Image: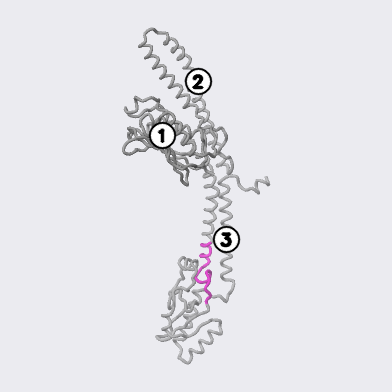
Amino acid sequence: MARNILRGPITLRGQIMVIILLALITVIVTGRALENFAKRDYAIPNLENAAEQIKTVALLMKQASPSERASILANAQRAGLDVSLAPISLVDKFKSSPEMQSAAETVVDFLFPPDGEPPLGGWRAFLDGRRVIAERVDAQTMVVFFGFPDTILTSSSLSQGSYYFIAVIVLIAFFFIFAIRAVTEPIKRISEAAIEADINSSSQIFEERGTIEIVSLARALNSMRNRIHLMVEGRTRMLRGISHDVRTPLTRLRLRTERMEDEALREALLIDIDQIDGLLAESLNYLRDDYATEGLERVDVASILQTVCSDFSDVGFEVTYHGPNKLIANCRPLSITRAVTNLCENAVKFGTTITIELNNSENGFSILVSDDGPGIPENLKHRVLEPFFKADQSRTNSPGFGLGLSIVSDIAHSHRGSLTLQDNHPHGLIVRLDVPRPRK
């Protein structure tokens, strides 16, 4: 129990209550300290009190004869007031702020302006870098007070309520600092974990640490993620089993077809059987999803792309590479090879000149595979990324089952990247694979 008390409340509500209580105590202590500090030295006058005293001295001089003014001035100086008589024309030399005025003092004067009628030259008048308060005696003479210290606590009329108002600002600052750390940071941690989550991994990615509410949220997200993982794994296993089991009767059908005497019918059936067998093989290849379980490695991406270009060039296709000779990056090399190979296989079906381009940036690298084929209509560019979907008639009669781009899209997502389709000019298609740098 003692340990729990030392650690503090374990609920978010309890932590907020404690910080508010501590902030209220800080308000009271800070407000009292500021008030006592400002009033500790009774010889330091308040701005408004000093203005009243100078106004009183000016009134006495106004009512006195010129010979009596010197006596009044001497008595005021003996009383501790640093005052002197000056010609009224000296007001023109008053400045509204000193050469090195503090921004904090300006803010205080703006928030807490003194009450009452301002003196001659205003509340913030400076002469030769010193703060002054002036009052008119007659048309030619004025009383100038130089003894007021220019500090942030005494340069404005800060009443007792004003000190507490400053302390309330401290309370708000403390509360928001706590709110950012105690509320925003745990949620941000969970959000980043959700972005980095890999559905194919069974490990607990949401750290169950923090307040009771945060721990409960992380535990619920982990449970939901495990259920999704089991559901996807079960359906994938079922589809793999179906695709595998269908091959047994398909093999028997092929053997029986090959014994048929009608050659034309036999060839037609064998073509259909080969197409079904290819579809099953492509489906198993798609469901294999080894790109999702492959680990990140630091490899030369440029070397991978150059190897793919060489493989296609060796069998007679015109595939060229444009980009740096070497580009080291963190990625899944087998997945990148598979993605670029699929893109090139699609490109050589519809175009004659294929280009693989590699670009590097601060955020990661991008691979562009372009062809000079018929391209894909704008309204179908999103749908061709769906499994088993084939585009318009210009591509429908071509071989393939519509899984190539789907696999590339999944590989891009496994890298936290993206796959976009763009038009090539004057005709053709550009497929852009963006792979960001892994987060630290």
Q: Secondary structure at mark 1?
A: strand
Q: Secondary structure at mark 3?
A: helix
The amino acid type found where label 1 is placed reads: Val
Please identify, in this view, whether the residue under mark 2 or under mark 1 is nearer the observer: 1
The amino acid type found where label 2 is placed reads: Gly
Q: Main secondary structure of the magenta part?
A: loop
Quadrant where the C terminus sits is top right
Numbered label attached to residue 28: 3
From mark 3 to mark 2, how far is it between C-alphas? 72 Å
Q: Position of residue 391 (x, y in %)?
A: 35, 29
Which residue in the protein does label 2 denote? 241
Q: Which range is magenta?
A: 148-166
Q: Earlier in the sequence, mark 3 or mark 2?
A: 3
268 shown above or below 435: above
In contact (CB < 8 Å): disc 3 and disc 1: no
Numbered label attached to residue 319: 1
Judge left or right: residue 50 versus residue 138.
right
Q: Secondary structure at mark 2?
A: helix
